[in-house]
Amino acid sequence: MTETWDKLPLGTMDDIAELETYNRVYYRPVYAMHKWFAPRPGSTFRILSLAALTDDKTTRDDILSTNDAKTKYHGKYLESNDFEGATILDPFAGGGTTLVEANRVGADVIGYELNPVAWWINKKIKDDVDVPELRQASTELVEKTRSDLSKYFTTTDPDTGSEAEILYTFQTQILPCLTCGEEVRLFKNYMLSNFKKNKTTNDVPGGVYCPNPDCDDRIIQTTEKVSDDLTCPSCNTTFDPKNGNARNYGGTVKYTCKNGHKHDVRETLDRLDEKPEFEYYAIQYLTKTGNKKFKEFTEEDQQTVEAVEERLDNEFEELPIPTQEIIPGDKTSRLTTRNYESYQDLYTDRQLLTYGTLFQNALEFDDGNIAEFLITGISNSLKRNSMLVKWNYHENHRKAENVFARKSYIPRVATVEPNPINTIENVTSVSNFLGFVADAKEYCQNPFEMVKEDGDTKKYPIQNERISEDNVRSLKCKTSENLELEDGEVDYVITDPPYYDNIQYSELSEYFYVWLHQVLGDRYDEMAPEHVPSAREIVKNDRTGKDGEFFVKTLANVFSESHRVLKDDGELIFTYHHNNNKAWAVILEALIQSGFTITGAYPVQSEMPGSMTVAELDNAEYDILIFANKETSTEEITLSELQQNLFFELQDMIKEERERHENLSQADLSVILRGKCMYYYSRHYPNVHSEGEQVGIDEALDTVDTIIEQILESSVNLPQDIDPVTKAYAAFSQRAPEEHDDLNKHLLAKNLNLSDLENEKLVKGSRSRKEPVTADERITFIEKKLNGNGKEGEELLDIDKVQYLYHLYKTDQNTREYLKEWKSQDLEELADFMSGITGDERYERVMNMGLSQF
């Protein structure tokens, strides 16, 4: 029998998934209909569906392969498929990836989703619509709203005196200094935009806002890259445009008044017992000739804002505006601790008036289905239109960023108010998002695949496939802990379960739901509650009393129900994605409790490489595909045998994975190796013993950590003869940041503990986020050791020598004396390693210097 995973063209899958995650709008428009959190690549789930539903004769090359030169793709992935009669269940429908891809290949799909926003996305994906009529309705909606409200997005061009369309209005927070009482306007920087040099078109001038309140013309136009030492041509104030009076200090924003008094923003708001107050200060507008320029916010612009306030007061009760309370939670507490009380507090009056009017106008369309698609597009545009939006001033962006770039709520000290009904239809415009909806429905009717061939992107229309309402057996907005299905009714369960505590779906989706409730609550019972139902949401959330035990119990309930409705020869396939060992333990425990046995675990691309999620939140880029079935095993194994089997197989896995992905990170490798550990333990459970006692899941995974540590460290280019503290620091630097307990486990495996690193000033941070101390931060400590070198307890570590040489080189000091004394093959290799993980070639350069250079 050919196993499903044997049909997976893993390397090719990753190549296509990586392209898709860079630009889902282009590669798979259906998933751009509305924002959902942590969507997995549709291409991966198309291949999973094909691998599951094809017969045993099908090979991975039959599904998708390339010629030797990788210039031509072929296989079932690029062909029309029809698996009529097969039934696939997704108990966590989320953004709809399983339901869409299985539906496309002709399978009957069943979806359960507790969250009403995700349920709504799935509903509108499946609902049929006349796309040309939808596009026409979108145009009518925007034109009607524009004709009514465009006067509130109009300013005067100071250069010509003519009327101009506002694109963005900039705001900054105002707080008093708690020491001297000065009213401080908070700026993290004074940048409006960077200068952009164009080869084929006109250069785009940059813009900077002068910090001097007495300046006659505070908008500085720049025709070259902005320097760190800029002088305002109007008032001669010299300043650093990228260095404002408000800064981040380890996640806390502090501001400084003119007298040098520094205060915490959140602490000030707490003492004042007030929500943040903002002031407009600049505008980006569109000239009559189509150029984008900046101007100061004027008294005339203030009068426009006051006119908006007056109209909103008059129409507030008639408009669908969210007045729901913000309930404190894991993510929403970032809002409530700053005294935001209601979701309407997250919007300016102009935004409330505009969105209330847009939603109201959409409701007035006679065709209810068309109205719902319009509502969906308007809702999606909210992710770039609120006071949680950040302005990106860099030359290749210049736009309002997505509110949920980090899957969290981030209150801003400076924000930007876009014009969502602008005529150029930029990334923040409602027209843009309504276009996404129409494109998504066009894709449902005429799906295609995109691949890179000969360096160009080629589009393959897939004839005779479509995402059809007819293939959806049922779509329910309820918990999947109790499935309304018969025993043995489904062929496959393919899903993407919640990742422990990674994403708080209900809290984040409230941002959209509070609006959708206002316009759809009377039409659908699923949208009637004031808030997203979260009592049975399967997550770990300490603030709401949901611990690891709750997560295991509820997830096991879903897996048990999936086990019941799955045919005896059926298969459970799901993705998992987490760096935390506890998260792996609970998913394994839930699987085992429900009667499943893991049969395979394989890594595939998930997040976009280099994305904010990956780079800034230290997430792995790879999912593990877990395959499980209803078979049981009675084969016994000891823990030591399990360790031996794992050690040799994991070594081979690392070699294979690094051949597939040259720059595989330590986080990715850890995820991949834990997936394989789950496979081995599940295969023998409950017959894993040590000294006659049954080995529990936590014990097995903790033991496995030691193996992973050994294998990962043996797989990196660290010299063997450097001191153990240096070796531990170097390995930690590659993994970091890391929680206290996880770091300590790695250290204990080397017969060290955290104090060994702390005593050497090599680690810093809170218990939840430990980070390596940099060379610059350690230099004073190293110099003290140098001055007392040779005394007990003052011996230099190898990392001390490398970091000190780096410091001397970086600050243009003579390194000859120390190179002559210290330079060795081991130190050169260590410097090369540090250069690789920090991206700073100066570590390597100083070791390559010859003594003759001095």
Image (cartoon, helix red, strand yellow):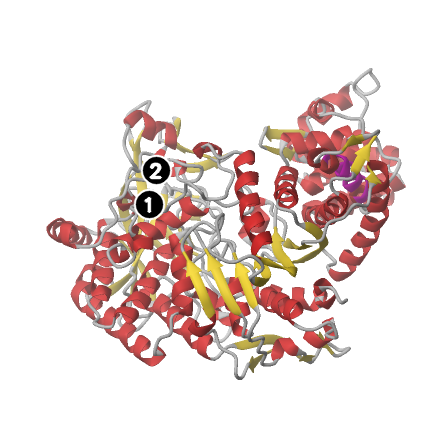
Q: Amino acid at mark 2?
A: Ile
Image height of 687 relative to 469, above or below: above
Q: Which residue, given by chain and number where applicable, does mark 1 sit on?
A: 531
Inter-mark Cα distance, 1 to 2: 9 Å
Reading the image, the residue beneath label 2 is 327
Tag 1 secondary structure: loop
Say what secondary structure mark 2 lies in: loop
> Do residues under tags 1 and 2 come within 8 Å of each other at their CB atoms?
yes
Question: In x, y percent, where is residue 267?
Answer: 37, 27
* Quadrant of the image occupied by residue 53: bottom right
Residue 779 vs residue 222: left or right? right
Give 455 or 203, whichever is nearer the viewer.
Answer: 455
Residue at the limit of the structure toward the top, as seen here: 792
Q: Which mark is residue 302?
A: none
Residue 786 in percent (x, y) is at 77, 24
Q: Which residues are magenta?
A: 702-711
* Of the pair 221 and 754, the residue shown nearer to us: 754
* Mark 1 surroundings: few (<14), some (14-19) or many (≥20) residues within 10 A: some
Where's residue 696, x and y in %? 71, 34
Q: Residue at x 81, y 45 (%)?
A: 635
Horizontal arrangement in the rendering, residue 331 relative to residue 302 (left or right): right
